[in-house]
Amino acid sequence: MGYLKTIINQYKWIIIGVISSCILLIFYFLSESDQDYYRDDIERAVEVDSVIAMLDKLPSGKYESVGYDKVAQYYDGQKESYEKLLTYLNDRVSRDNTEYGIASLYVGHGLVSLSEGEMDSVVFYIQEAEKIMPLGNNRCSYFELIAMYHLTRGDLKMSKTYLNKGLEEAIRHRDVVKRRFFLNKLGSICFNESLYGAASKYFLEVYSTYPSGKGAPAELIGNIISVKIVEGNYQEAEVFWKKNEDLLAGARDRYSRQLVLINRIELNLHLGRMEETAALMSQLPDSIVLSNLRIHHLANRLNYAKEKSPKSALTLLRKRLDWIMGDYFGAVTRLTPFLIQSINEESGLLEADSLESWKNRSLEQFEENPMASSNHYQLLSAIYHKQDNKMLEAYESLLISNDYKDKYHLLDDSVKRADFTAKKDFESMKTKQYAFEKEMLQQKKINGYLAGTYGSVVLTLFLLVLFLWARQTAKKKELDWAQMQLHVQVEEKEFLQKEKELNARIIGLSELVMEKSLELSKKLKLLNTSNSPEIETLRKELEALGRVETTSRPQIADSKLKEQGDIMEQYPQLKAMNLTEKRIFILSVDGYKSKDIAAIVGVSPQYIHNVRSKIRKVLGVDNSVHWESFKDKRPQG
């Protein structure tokens, strides 16, 4: 296990990295979402290069739909950006050559053709996209194209059908941007159909998709306030206004700024704030009011004039006849009391033929709104009544107006029922949304459990492989260590054998020297006839050399080992030394010089020096420690 710890410690950063990767992988699966967060960023982007850079990061199946949506946005007023983005998308779609990409290309061309009013081309692109559009991909833009095509043709029923299909698709793919689009369009249709309860629910649902206190566009907030004003909920409108005051103040596009300002003026009029109303009106000169907001603005101006200077209303209305002509349907729904008053006060201000001509230009809207038709015939009656020879026409027009008013009152109940039905449809949509989100949450949990299981298995297998590899490495190192020890033992055995042979040779030579010295001594004794002192001295030295006997043998060291063995017990590190080394140690401790030890043990003085150095290294002492001091460290008996 010691080797395993060493291996783990050596590769700890690799192990930590792998484990961290596994954990991150598990968290990725746990937090995985199909939400298309990138849509918000691309929708907000203005520069085409930024859009292309973001689209580049998206894979096939993601970039096509949002890319062609952006192309349609660029078409009006940003031709260079439109052409650059369209070229990029067409090139990439051609390169990828996927069914979804080609279908999205057809949808993109269809949206552009729709903005150009080329309805036949729109039908062609819808049919071509339908042939190859895969069911599994996000088809929100496809349903948007069909819904807007029917809305342009005035077929509200079919338009709402495809808007609801698109809404379901947006919920399924968690496409927040498209979900907002479909909800907003459904709310607008309900508002135009006077289904204010349903319109309010749709607009508020769109509002709820934005983070609290930020993000919601001013136009949406303005629409919600408009619904509350139409319903007569002025205090609610005021509270909602204050809640979103910062967002409304930050309105960027011209339409949103004017809508916000006009709504504020109308709300102040209903709440009796005349001074603030006058200040706001001064910020919006008639010359800059957008065409689709003019009647709304003129109604506010007339209501203000009615309170402050009733006589100025006729002058103001006379100046804005071109606005009434441009949006006659809006005029008869919001300005009828002022128009009748003006007709009664000034003959010839409006002519019956002109009113009929203006009505025919918006015939479909009048057919769907009996109150607007009633107001139209009421205006005709007032015009005819001013002419003595037209009293019969005045009477007939008044009868028709009353008939339409009766129809409206009958229709009012059906409108309420339709509004109730529309609200039920909205609740049904919410129920489907909750069910789908619950299903997605459950699927996410299952995916999380699977990811956790797979991650645990992978991590376990990795650790198992790491353990087996470490154990195999440890075994290999143990085997290498054992082989090295065996090799050392073999070398030591060979060394001991050589040392034994050398000692035997030295002893043999010593015996030979002793034998020869004694033999020479005897010969010198026989030759010493002249009693020469030099010869006698030489002979005695040879006899002394021959009498060395055991004192010149290694056995003297062995006897020292037996006598002073307790010194050896104090130094267990020396147990691994061979016999010659032990002899050298004990003789060194006993005070013998290197030359004497060499003579006793039968080795060279250099060998004595090497062994002593080895012993000092094993014991961890330097040359400052004398050998005799080891004897003093023995425990006293």
Image (tube, rainbow, N blue to C red):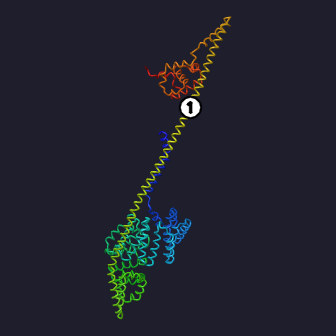
- Residue 211 sits in which quadrant? bottom left
- Residue 483 sits in which quadrant? top right
Name the amino acid type tagged 1.
Val
> In which quadrant will I find the C terminus?
top left
Q: Residues within 10 Å of mark 1 (few under 14, many from 20)?
A: few
Relative to the observer, which residue lies in front, 362 or 303? 362
Say if 468 sits above or below 216 in the image. Answer: above
In-image side of 49 versus 297 (left or right): right
Residue 379 percent coordinates (x, y): 36, 86
Q: How many marks?
A: 1
Residue 138 percent coordinates (x, y): 47, 67
In-image side of 481 versus 301 (left or right): right
Q: Is residue 326 visible?
A: yes
Relative to the observer, which residue lies in front, 387 or 265? 387
Residue behind mark 1: 488
Residue found at x 46% / y 63%: 38
Residue 124 percent coordinates (x, y): 51, 75
Say if 21 sits above or below 47 in the image. Answer: above
Residue 422 percent coordinates (x, y): 36, 73
Disc 1 on helix, strand or loop? helix
Q: Is residue 275 visible?
A: no
In-image side of 177 versus 507 (left or right): left
In-image side of 46 versus 302 (left or right): right
Relative to the observer, which residue lies in front, 578 or 108? 578
